[in-house]
C-alpha cells in the first residue's frame, strides 16, 4: 500500500510541476503516473551509472553537475513517454528541481500516513 501512495504522490508532484512551468506539459493523470514510474526506474538504474561516469566533473563543479544529470534524465523521459512534453534543457532542469522538492515533501507526508 505504501508503494501505491508514494506512486500517486509522485504523479501529483509531476502534475503540480507541469502546472507551474509553462514549458512542461503533462497530458493527463495517467501520463503523470507513467512519468512517475519511469522516473523512479531511471533514478534507480541509469542515474547511479551516470553519477559514476561523471565523478570528475561532479567534483570540479562541487556537485552542481548532478542537476544536469537530473535534467538529462527528464529529457530522456520526455523522449520515452508520450504524455510528457518538455521544451528544452532549462525547463527540464526547473521541472526536475520542482519534482524533487515536492517529492521530498510528499515523502515526508507519506511516512506519516
Image: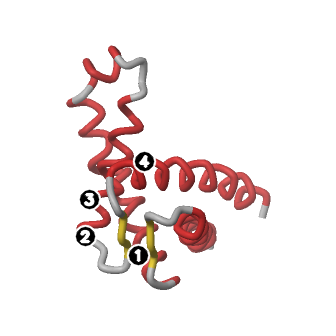
Secondary structure at badge 1 equals helix
Gap between marks 2 and 4 measured at Cα: 17 Å
Q: Is residue 44 left or right of residue 94?
A: left
> Of marks 2 and 4, which one's residue comes earlier in the chain?
2
Q: Quadrant of residue 62?
A: top left
> Residue 22 location in percent, x, y?
50, 66
Labels 3, 4: front one = 4
Are circles 3 and 2 on residues that touch, CB within 8 Å?
A: yes
First-in-chain label (3 vs 4): 3
Above-or-below relation of 77 to 28: above
- Residue 90 versus residue 47: which sits nearer the camera? 90
Few, some or many C-alpha atoms within 10 Å of disc 3 (few <14, some 14-19, many ≥20)?
Answer: some
Q: SS class of the residue under badge 2? A: helix
Q: Residue at x 62, y 73 (%)?
A: 1
For the residue carrying disc 4, how many other residues have a C-alpha within 10 Å: few (<14), some (14-19), or many (20+)? many
Q: Which residue is mark 3?
A: 76
Residue 5, numbered circle: none
Inter-mark Cα distance, 1 to 4: 19 Å
Tell me where residue 91 sits by quadrant.
bottom left
Q: CA distance from mark 1 to mark 3?
A: 13 Å
Amino acid at each position: 500500500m505504501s508503494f501505491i501512495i508514494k506512486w500517486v504522490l509522485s504523479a501529483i508532484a509531476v502534475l503540480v510541476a507541469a502546472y507551474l512551468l509553462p514549458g512542461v506539459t503533462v497530458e493527463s493523470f495517467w501520463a503523470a503516473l507513467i512519468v512517475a514510474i519511469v522516473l523512479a526506474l531511471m533514478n534507480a538504474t541509469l542515474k547511479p551509472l551516470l553519477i559514476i561516469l561523471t565523478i570528475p566533473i561532479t567534483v570540479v563543479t562541487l556537485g552542481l553537475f548532478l542537476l544536469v544529470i537530473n535534467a538529462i534524465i527528464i529529457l530522456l523521459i520526455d523522449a520515452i513517454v508520450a504524455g510528457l512534453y518538455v521544451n528544452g534543457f532549462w525547463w527540464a532542469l526547473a521541472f526536475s528541481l520542482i519534482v524533487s522538492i515536492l517529492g521530498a515533501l510528499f515523502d515526508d507526508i507519506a511516512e506519516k500516513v
